[in-house]
Image (cartoon, helix red, strand yellow):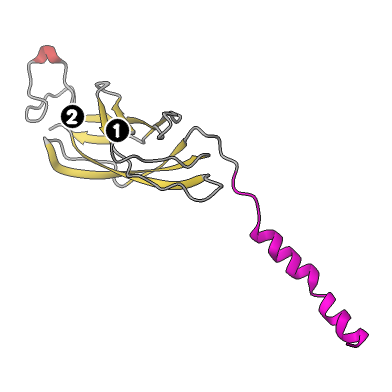
Amino acid sequence: MTEKKILARVKYLPVVGLALLAACASPPNYPIEPHIEFLSLSKDTLQRGAFFQDTAFITISFTDGDGDIGDADSLNLFLKDLRTESVTKNRIPFVPELGAANGLKGEITVRIFSTCCVFDPDLGLDPCVDVHPSLPVDELVYEMYIVDRAGHQSNKVQTSTIYIPCN
């Protein structure tokens, strides 16, 4: 082989080397506790009513260093209604761990349903039917967090405000 042909092949070695190095780049370095961020709410107003009258979707992003998100048998996504402190518990479907480097990043979308307005209990009003001039619109904010399969709890985030017409 001539010196020219050898030099022609050698000049591409750094490019090939960089490509191989990029393919072996280290995985993301996330903490083992899940971390979530509120991304969006599909709409900001829900009709007042019992459960199935209206729906909206909340989307959050997450990262988890050991990739153990989701479990079909456990309640692992929690939404707390900050008006009443009541907690709705949901399941994130099982997400398989991926290879040796299990850092995981993704999005979760949760469907929420209609809810009633919250009146002062002393008024004796039906929160899903009655109206009261002092509360034409109720404002609902959820506080959310998730728990991974190892029991690590994420940080807590709040949704943007959801308006519920009460008249």
Amino acid residing under circle 2? Pro
Q: Is residue 101 above or below residue 1?
A: above
Q: Is residue 141 visible?
A: no
Task: Depth check: give the residue in front, 68 or 79.
Answer: 68
Residue 161: % across, % down: 32, 34
Is 54 situated left or right of 8 in this image? left
Residue 89: % across, % down: 27, 31
For this orientation, the residue located farthest to the bottom is 2
Task: Depth check: give the residue in front, 145 or 9.
Answer: 9
Residue 82: % across, % down: 30, 24
The magenta region covers 1-28
Q: Quadrant of residue 116?
A: top left
Mark 1 or 2 closer to N-term?
A: 1
Amino acid residing under circle 1? Leu
Quadrant into which the C terminus falls: top left
The residue pinned by badge 2 equals: 136
The residue pinned by badge 1 equals: 75
Residue at 17 percent across and 22 percent down: it is 134
Is 30 situated left or right of 72 in this image? right
Residue at 41 percent across and 28 percent down: it is 151
Q: Quadrant of residue 22?
A: bottom right
Task: Depth check: give the residue in front, 150 or 108.
Answer: 150
Label 2 residue SS: loop
Label 1 residue SS: loop
Residue at 17 percent across and 43 percent down: it is 54
Q: Which numbered disc, 1 or 2, marks the residue closer to the eye?
A: 1
Q: Is residue 46 above or below residue 156?
A: below
